[in-house]
Amino acid sequence: MFLGLFFRHSGITANLLVKANFVVFTCRQNIRFYGVEMAKPSVYVTRQINKEALDILNQKCDVSVWAGPGPVPRDELLRNIKDKSGLFCMLTDKIDSELLDNAGKNLKIIATMSVGYDHFDVNEIKKRGIRMAYTPDILTDATAELAVALLLATSRRLLEANEEARTGGWKAWSPFWMCGPGLKGSTVGIVGFGRIGQEIAKRLKAFGPARIVYFNRSEKINEAREIGADRVSFDELLSVSDFISVSCSLTPDTKEMFNEAAFKKMKKTAVFINTSRGGVVDQDALVRALEDGTIWGAGLDVMTPEPLQVEHPLFKLRNCVILPHIGSACSETRNDMAILTAKNIVAALTNQPLLTELKV
């Protein structure tokens, strides 16, 4: 982008040309060039990221990174966001009016290294004219793979069996020891039939279920036809499914949709898998459903809060498999997510279209 300024003084005609980060001064008498580098926009990164993503930011921005272990402490984030032009954040960072007030008027872009954005106060961010970016699509395959792995680990009791083998519980082969429900001939229910839900369904189809059903706020006619899935009501999905995999977003409509009433509508042999957000489940109701045999088992990659306290009742249940929110924890996926986040920030700060802008 060029900005040209023209002036006359004492018989000298001159042009001041601003190009990118340099100022060029020329005059008709004794032409001279002055290369003065202008200040780069400043960006704060809330966790340590891969070199490829950091290099992208460093080319155009003055970058500072939280280098401590774990998420950046709230007071540290509030202090370091002051006067920044861009924020590279994570799901663990609450982006609210307090943070935006501390940032000041320079903040132009908030980019999260995630597909979820329930940590954003979207209305407040939009009100201030700040752009938002996220990382959809990139983590679809990794999350779908994890959902299938979690379903199999839960239904085939893999963690439980491994513990028995390690601690001497494995005595001899027994015909019905460590048995669990199989996918072949079953009915699989997918709650949230977006990109991730569809990929989960495609992968599970290979195991030979008799039927795949889905519940989604909008109908996915072409996608469902390709997969061979039927759209049903939420109540019907609960009642007919042997396996239920949740991949919906957390919204006011989906908050705690899996409550005591929902679990009671499920089969006693049902396996419940959640890789979406912990907030879609009433966890106390889930504990009761697992304890009293309302459902057979559950596999969770997401909880409320995170991390879940080690004293939580869910950890005491043998029919519940818990993972520490590792749905997208594939090395290639995480690298690509960070690179996309960095590119979105640079695009916003150089007045270019964002690759994956969040518009809600």
Image: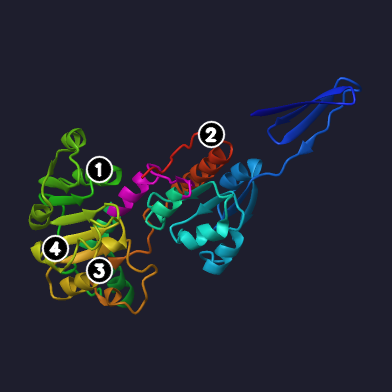
Where the C terminus falls, by quadrant? Answer: top left
- Element assignment for label 3: strand
Q: Is residue 50 visible?
A: no
User: Which circle's residue, 1 or 3, is located before the other in the chain?
Assistant: 1
Q: Kindly report which numbered mark, 2 or 3, lies closer to the viewer in this rendering.
A: 2
Residue visible at 91% across and 23% down in the picture: 30
**Between marks 4 and 1, how big is the CA–CA gap?**
22 Å
Q: Which mark is residue 303?
A: none
**Residue 36 included in the magenta stretch of the image:** no
> Looking at this view, is 182 or 274 the one in front?
274
Looking at the picture, which amino acid does disc 4 mark?
Answer: Ala
- Residue 167 lies left or right of residue 131; in this view the side is left
Looking at the picture, which amino acid does disc 2 mark?
Answer: Gln
Q: Kindly report which numbered mark, 4 or 2, lies closer to the viewer in this rendering.
A: 2
Q: Which residue is mark 1?
A: 198
Looking at the picture, which amino acid does disc 1 mark?
Answer: Gln
Q: Which residue is mark 2?
A: 352
Residue visible at 71% across and 36% down in the picture: 21
Q: Which mark is residue 320?
A: 3
Q: Which residue is mark 4?
A: 262
Q: Residues within 10 Å of mark 2 (few under 14, many from 20)?
A: few
Check the image and report above or below for 228 versus 309: above
User: Which circle's residue, 4 or 1, is located before the other in the chain?
Assistant: 1
